[in-house]
Image (cartoon, rainbow, N blue to C red):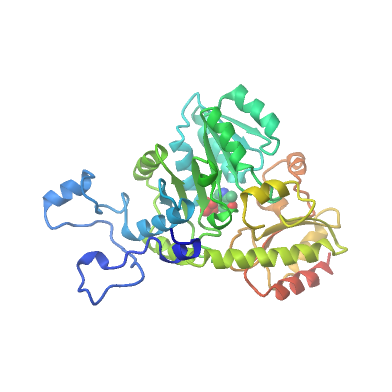
Amino acid sequence: MRRFETRAVHAGERRGGGGREPATSNPISTPIYASTTFWHPDVQTTDRVLGGEEAGYSYTRYGNPTVTAFEEAVAALESPRGGARSFAFASGMAALHAALLAAELSPGGRVLAAEQLYGSTATLLVQIFGSSGVEVRFADFYDLKSLQRRVEELTPRALVVESISNPLLRVADVPRLAELSRSAGAALIVDNTFGTPYLQRPLELGADIVVHSATKYLSGHGDLTAGVVTAGPPYDAALDQVRKLTGGILGPFEAWLALRGLKTLPLRVERQCENSTRLAGFLAEHPKVRRVNHLSMEDHPDREVARRTLSGPSGLLSFELDTEGREGVFRFLNALEVCVRTPSLGDVYTLATHPATSSHRDLPPSRRERLGVGENLVRVSVGIEHPEDIKEDIARALERV
Ligand SMILES: *Cc1c(COP(=O)(O)O)cnc(C)c1O
């Protein structure tokens, strides 16, 4: 099997243009197949393609070569030994919706989700699945003893967790969660957006379904919205069907951009891990900083789990400023010049955000406080710039706190 970096560059590419062009004009980069429909030499072939007896494309909502190229590349990274297929969607939320449907969340069924989930995922569960008769419960996924009791008591159909949580960067113990869900007959769904397949491959650790907001690290340049789900049987057939029928497909242009972004995933994440570790070390020593959350920190509560399940600290960190209220934090954020003030993550640019007024703004302050998201917390998604420029920018802005 070829190595991760090699697969990231080559997997999925359709070289050869389907054998119709002369052998001397084969593109090395898969073209953007901007075509809704595909024709065949005769109607018998169309019949076989539609019937699934012969490989081929018919209608873009069912499949498109540019989108397939991106899906095959993701599958080669998340499931290098094969056995799982990837399905691309128009956004991370559409991908999560499909993953939850594929786990057969139907009226009367229960789902147990981590309290620290991405806000829209929690709201999707409560508002869309909850209102159609699914019982939605939340639990602390980092206390495995009490979680085990909740699983035995609730017998959920699915467990939902993120490989690394936002913004405190708690690390899910995916191997233990997989054992727990397997013994309860539940599907384990892991949102690996923060982890990326470069740092963790949840399917290899026993998870059943892996989801990404490809808007973030997989594409990595802040220029497209996409989602992708990877799973083996029986979930792959369900995902194929859900996508055909709900229609939240990824467009060929976005798939092409995402495939291009994916090629540099290992380079970007490697650099982001290095840059974030340097920045975390600098912040930990700074008098205006009370606490730093980063997986390189000795006092991170999940150091041991991270050592077993992740191959790097990720490019994300958060820190508490030594101030009360939001005024000092706002002065800090407004003073940034290299780092971009915006709530997304995973880009080549360093992005800084204030979780209390962005990702966690809809939560009551008491719940925010319980999750450790205070007014003085800043989250940084470290980019690939020169580390000294990031550090100098943040050092200068810290003087304004
Ligand atoms: C951004 C994000 C999502 C949602 O993805 P979109 O592409 O914005 O729909 C889901 N989960 C996590 C962890 C995210 O960061």
Closest to the observer, 107 or 295: 295
Name the foreground residue: 176 vs 333. Answer: 176
Q: Residue at x 82, y 61 (%)?
A: 284
Q: Is residue 38 left or right of residue 399?
A: left
Q: Nearer the viewer, residue 84 or 170?
A: 84
Residue 214 seen anywhere in this rendered image of the structure: yes
Q: Is residue 161 above or below residue 273?
A: above
**How many numbered discs sit on the rendered protein?**
0
Whether 292 is drawn above or below 337: the answer is: above
Residue at 59% across / 61% down in the picture? 346
Q: For residue 180, which quarter of the picture?
A: top right
x, y (%) of residue 323? 86, 57
Residue in the picture at 38% in, 41% down = 242
Residue at the farthest front position: 1
Single out the residue that lies furthest toward the right: 287
- Looking at the image, residue 392 sits to the left or right of residue 18; the answer is right
The N terminus appears in which quarter of the rendering?
bottom left
Residue 296's spot in the image, x, y percent?
73, 57
Q: Position of residue 200 (x, y in %)?
A: 57, 52
Instruction: Report if residue 378 is visible in the image.
Output: no
Q: Position of residue 146 (x, y in %)?
A: 70, 29
Q: Is residue 118 left or right of residue 377?
A: left
Q: Residue at x 70, y 53 (%)?
A: 355
* Image quarter in which the C terminus is found: bottom right
